[in-house]
Image (tube, grey):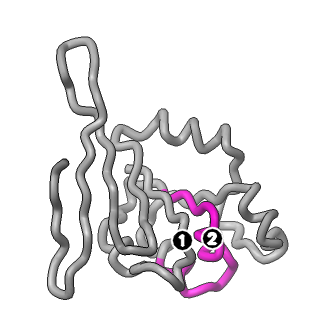
């Protein structure tokens, strides 16, 4: 699954996201989420422990002046690289918002030849994650 973090890890339920990520996943840091790519940050260390592949968008890194502070564990990619990541992943999108809502888009077969996205959401409560289909 491709996870995108577009909110600063200081302003979202970062620990909830970590509970979903496995070593088979890919994490793309974008917008304010690139803050998590700073070398030796506790957020980066936590992401590395998941074993997931880590990427960050170059435009967002440059916009925030973080070019010289990034960890070498994070691969820097362009928007074209982002598109390639979405093409490779079967479950193509999981977005962590400041409101602590996660959206999943997965292909749902409509017939033998076409598919449409299925959207479901997840949010954290104090004791558990709650999943809904829309």
Give the residue displayed 69% in from the left and 50% down from the top. Answer: 77
Instruction: Determine the residue located farthest toward the top in the rendered image.
Output: 113
Give the residue displayed 26% in from the left and 12% down from the top. Answer: 113
Give the residue displayed 48% in from the left and 33% down from the top. Answer: 87
Q: Main secondary structure of the magenta part?
A: helix
Where does residue 72 sit, x and y in percent of width and height?
A: 71, 67
Residue 134 located left or right of residue 90? left
User: Which residues, given as a range, are shown in magenta?
Assistant: 27-46
Circle number at residue 71? none
Residue 54 located left or right of residue 17? right
Instruction: Tell me the residue that label 2 is attached to.
Output: 32
- Magenta highlight on residue 45: yes
Instruction: Work out whether 25 lies above or below 105.
Output: below
Q: CA distance from mark 1 to mark 2?
A: 5 Å
Say few, some or many: other residues with alpha carbon within 10 Å of mark 2 (under 14 / 14 to 19 / 20 or more): some
Find residue 84 and report its image quarter.
top right
Instruction: Tell me the residue that label 1 is attached to.
Output: 7
Q: Nearer the viewer, residue 120 or 21?
A: 120
How many marks overall? 2
Instruction: Give yes or no for contact between labels 1 and 2 (Cβ–Cβ under 8 Å).
Output: yes
Q: Secondary structure at mark 1?
A: loop
Where does residue 82 sit, x and y in percent of width and height?
A: 60, 44
Q: Secondary structure at mark 2?
A: helix
Give the residue displayed 16% in from the left and 57% down from the top. Answer: 132
Where does residue 25 sit, x and y in percent of width and height?
A: 40, 55
């Amino acid at each position: 699954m491709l996870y995108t973090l577009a909110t600063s890890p200081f302003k979202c339920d970062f620990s909830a996201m970590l509970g979903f990520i496995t070593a088979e996943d890919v994490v793309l840091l974008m917008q304010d989420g690139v803050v998590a790519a700073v070398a030796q940050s506790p957020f980066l260390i936590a992401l590395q422990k998941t074993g997931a592949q880590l990427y960050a968008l170059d435009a967002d890194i440059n916009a925030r002046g973080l070019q010289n502070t990034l960890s070498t564990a994070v691969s820097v990619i362009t928007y074209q690289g982002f598109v390639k990541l979405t093409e490779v992943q079967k479950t193509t999108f999981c977005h962590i918002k400041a409101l602590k809502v996660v959206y999943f888009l997965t292909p749902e077969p409509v017939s033998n030849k076409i598919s449409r996205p299925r959207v479901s959401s997840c949010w954290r409560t104090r004791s558990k994650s709650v999943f809904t289909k829309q």
